């Protein structure tokens, strides 16, 4: 597992909570379409009774095409647009309505959108914003980064969540490297992926532990535990709170690897209630080296 700074924490889109400010694009998968992630983001938000605002580039698909892409025949997104739960706007309309970018005006615009969502009775406002308006208007990197840092007060209101999408085809490497440092979170660009990172007291895994990521999951876990085992009994904390799905095979591998550690070792797994229940059913309670600590809420978590 590679060590990762907390400010650069990657999370699956289903794990975003109201009050989160995240970016997407930096360090992601080159050429990966964002629409699968935006679809999951939109449908999850609608199901939670939150309003969704999609801020797209003028060169994107038309509003009707976007709705059809997100809806895929379900009728859910079409209905949400009809009743006002889904709103679509262009980034030039939000950020540079008169051709000029003014930081405070933009912040005030988003604050008004939050107030409107609240007044309309929605549980919160979720936004995805294509940031390609910035190179379109030749905005300097420093000013853009200063703006991203200045919006923090918006997220003090737990009714607001946003993903700022930086399309790597339109931003250079220097900016995309800096973007992650001014966003508390980075959204993973694939729904079926796994990220394993080191922490001061152990490791953290985010995404999904399933057939497509099974080998990666087991190898990362084995490497981390064997490294800790070099000097004898140890205490290892494995944070799985941002793992949206874990298949039974991966859960069994986790239990087996913990059971193979020397007596006196301890692996503390921090996870949600559902995963904790699965680990318990598979015999985690019979392994002295394994402690399951159930924490947080359950939105988006699955196991099987």
Image (spheres, rainbow, N blue to C red):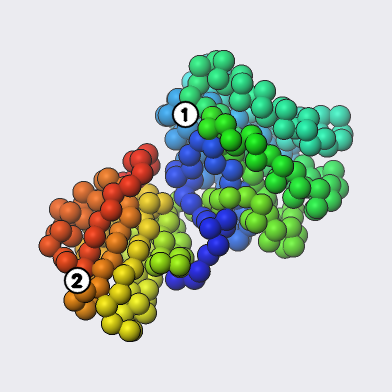
Tell me if residue 21 comes above or below residue 50 in the rendering: below
1 vs 2, front mark: 2
Tell me if residue 115 comes above or below residue 246 in the rendering: above
Q: Secondary structure at mark 1?
A: helix
* Residue 234 visible in image: yes
Q: Is residue 145 left or right of residue 302?
A: right
Task: Pick whichever, 176 or 75, lies toward us.
Answer: 176
* Residue 219 visible in image: no
Q: Residue furthest bottom?
A: 231
- Asked where in the image residue 97 lies, by quadrant, the reply is top right
Residue 78 position in % (x across, y down): 51, 24
Q: Are marks 1 and 2 in contact (CB under 8 Å)?
A: no
Please identify the quadrant where the N terminus is shown: bottom left
Q: Residue at x 42, y 54 (%)?
A: 207
Marker count (numbered): 2
Residue 47 position in % (x across, y down): 42, 29
Residue 273 position in % (x across, y down): 27, 45
Q: CA distance from mark 1 to mark 2?
A: 42 Å
Q: Secondary structure at mark 2?
A: helix
Label annotation for residue 259: 2
Q: Is residue 273 left or right of residue 82?
A: left
Q: Is residue 273 left or right of residue 203?
A: left
Instruction: Count residues near mark 1 (Cα–Cα under 10 Å), then give few for <14, some for 14-19, many for 20+.
Output: many
Residue 148 position in % (x across, y down): 70, 45
Please give the residue where the numbered disc 1 appears in the rendered image.
46
Tell me if residue 302 comes above or below residue 262 in the rendering: above
Task: Pick whichever, 10 or 81, lies toward us.
Answer: 10
């Amino acid at each position: 597992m590679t060590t990762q700074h907390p400010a650069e924490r990657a999370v699956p889109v289903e794990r975003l909570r109201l009050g989160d400010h995240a970016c997407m694009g930096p360090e992601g998968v080159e050429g990966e379409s964002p629409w699968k992630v935006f679809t999951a983001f939109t449908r999850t938000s609608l199901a939670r009774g939150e309003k969704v605002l999609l801020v797209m580039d003028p060169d994107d698909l038309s509003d009707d095409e976007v709705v059809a892409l997100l809806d895929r025949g379900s009728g859910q997104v079409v209905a949400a647009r009809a009743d006002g739960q889904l709103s679509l706007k262009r980034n030039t309309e939000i950020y540079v309505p008169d051709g000029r970018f003014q930081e405070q005006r933009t912040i005030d615009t988003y604050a008004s959108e939050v107030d409107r969502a609240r007044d309309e009775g929605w549980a919160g406002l979720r936004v995805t914003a294509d940031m390609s308006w910035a190179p379109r208007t030749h905005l300097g990197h420093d000013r853009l980064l200063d703006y991203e840092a200045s919006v923090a007060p918006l997220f003090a209101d737990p009714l607001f969540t946003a993903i700022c999408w930086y399309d790597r085809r339109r931003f250079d490497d220097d900016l995309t490297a800096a973007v992650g440092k001014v966003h508390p979170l980075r959204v993973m660009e694939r729904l079926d992926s796994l990220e394993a990172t080191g922490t001061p007291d152990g490791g953290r895994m985010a995404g999904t532990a399933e057939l497509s990521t099974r080998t990666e999951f087991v190898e990362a876990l084995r490497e981390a535990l064997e490294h800790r085992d070099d000097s004898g009994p140890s205490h290892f904390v494995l944070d799985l709170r941002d793992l949206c799905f874990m298949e039974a095979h991966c859960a069994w591998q986790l239990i087996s690897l913990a059971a193979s550690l020397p007596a006196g070792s301890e692996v503390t797994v921090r996870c949600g209630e559902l995963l904790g229940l699965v680990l318990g059913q598979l015999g985690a309670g019979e392994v002295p080296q394994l402690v399951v600590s159930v924490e947080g809420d359950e939105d988006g978590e699955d196991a099987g």
